[in-house]
Amino acid sequence: MFIKTRDKSIAEKLIVAALTTSAIIFGFMLIAILLFMLQESWAVWSEISVWSFLSGTDWRPVAAVPQLGIAAMIASTLWVAGGSLLIAAPLGFGSAVFLAEFAPFWLAAVLRPVLNILTGIPSVVYGFLGAAVLVRYFESSFDLATGESLFAASLVLAIMILPYIISNSESSLRSVPLEYRHAGLALGVSRPYMVWRILLPLAGKGMLGALVLALGRALGETMAVLMLAGNILLFPSSWFSQGEPLPALIALELGSATPGTLHYQGLFAAGFVLLLIVIAINILIHALQHKLKNEVSRF
Amino acid sequence: MNRRRLVDYVQLGFYWLSGLSVLLVLLAIIAYLVWRGGPQINLEFLLERPRGTPLGSAGGIFPAIKGTLWLVFWALFFSVPSGLVTAVFLSEYGSRWRIAGLLNLMIQSMAGIPSIITGLFAYALGVVQLGWGISLLAGGLALGIMIFPVIAVSTRDALQAVDNNYRLLACSLGVSELYALRRIILPRAMPGILAGILLATGYAAGATAPIMVTAAAIISSSSGAIFEPVMALPYHLYILFNEHISMDNAYATALILVVILLIINMMVLWLRSWQERIKQK
């Protein structure tokens, strides 16, 4: 950050002004995207009520009397994402504690790049491996007609969000001041006890933030759920039934929807709902981070 | 006392187990891909176009590699200038404007937009409204919007990490801000900026959802014409598997994709460690 100076040449002032304007324009692209999606889906919100779009369980966009309801897709999305958190959270927190407290220096130096590399593997590769290995395994060992299910998608998604949970939880564990560790250990408790009773409660909020961030990722993930969830437009009855989460719906049907039809607009409405959920989560994280900061400074 | 001990050991065991399981996952993924895909990879696979019936069951993946390179090029074309400008504003001039805080929140939120949504947006804007059709340009736009926040945030952080004394010193010597930015601040942040751009390149190269609705074709020569659809590695992998064309070639394509991204990620890590060394000097 430069300090403010008065004497600037006109050229310099112009350049700074151009910089400022374009940065503001680029920064507000999010608003532009939101408005654009709203406009594209406007027919849905005005013709079908918001509530019946969200709670309807029939998705027949090309029928004579088109019916648009995305409740089944929302339920699938939540099952898949929530389930993946359920699987990834214990493992992720465990790994984070391991990295922050117990891992020998050399092992931590190996593990951190490994986390980076895991986040770099494309989702289509995870989806492919999940479908080619995991689904086949389910089919052969449990004698199922098809191994594709929300559970399979959750399992693969859990692996994909694990690195995010670990690295964010680790940094919140590390942000606990050293004095607390020392004070705990000086009282003669064991290290695991110290972790359980001192570190985890203090870092809890940050770790919750890591979980919420991962939830945002899981909700919007497309390829893995597309290849694993089974793509059936029915309301999922359990974790082990098949379903079609919102991103998969959009990816599968966008190419065949004629622009201007209710089908096309319905897909944009579905995308708008997904976008709103994810943005709400991001704002929640932002608020959580602020709270966390206050908490640490209070101690 | 003994029960306490037992609880400790159980905890410790759990921490070790979960830590090592992460390592195991990566090793398993890479080993399995090498085992299943490795034998198919040779020069012909890399440099031939897809052949056989159905197309892709024989031959190679050259157009897919080329198409991915083109897509990455256009994604960077759309996102690097805008990302850099936004980052410079946020880091160097932001505090003079109250809007900068809001801008930061927006860009942070943009980073969380699901990739399929950027595809949806680029589809409506580029493919339909601007009449580009399923095209390289529309795919580049979708990917560009997707990686813009990555570049903006990492560049902003790299610039902010430059010691503020350099700015004060430049100012006290009467050097203009822009000159100082160009000759002092940017060079010192360069490895960090490059790391961010490279990371974004990796994301763009591996993303499937945005291009499957805007740019990808099952078969194309990927000539680089901007209004033509292209093939792309991740989409090719999806098609090979989903249309049951060839499992062997799917494994080989996945391996190529993972190796490319592995190399990119290694370079990112290396650039970051270089940046750390500059900072400590």
Image: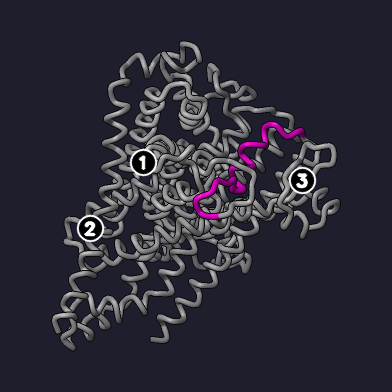
Task: Kindly tell me whether residue B88 is visible in this rendering.
Answer: no
- Numbered disc 3: what chain? A
> 10 Å neighbourhood of mark 1: few (<14), some, or many (≥20)?
few
Please, is residue B253 above or below residue B49 in the view? below
Q: Amino acid at mark 1?
A: Ser
**Number of numbered discs:** 3
Horizontal and vertical percent position of residue B80: 52, 42
- Numbered disc 2: what chain? A
Q: Amino acid at mark 3?
A: Glu
| Residue at the left extreme of this rendering | B2
Which numbered circle lies on residue A141? 1
Q: CA distance from mark 1 to mark 2?
A: 36 Å
Q: Which residue is mark 2?
A: A108
Residue A292: say if magenta: no
Which residues, given as a range, are shown in magenta? Answer: A238-258
Left or right of A31? Residue A243 is left
Report if the CB atoms under discs 1 and 2 are less than 8 Å apart: no
Q: Quadrant of the N terminus of chain B?
A: bottom left
SS at circle 2: helix
Q: CA distance from mark 2 to mark 3?
A: 48 Å
Colour scheme in use: one colour
Between A222 and B193, the one lying in front of the other is A222
- Residue depicted at x 58% and y 41%: A231
Horizontal and vertical percent position of residue B248: 37, 23
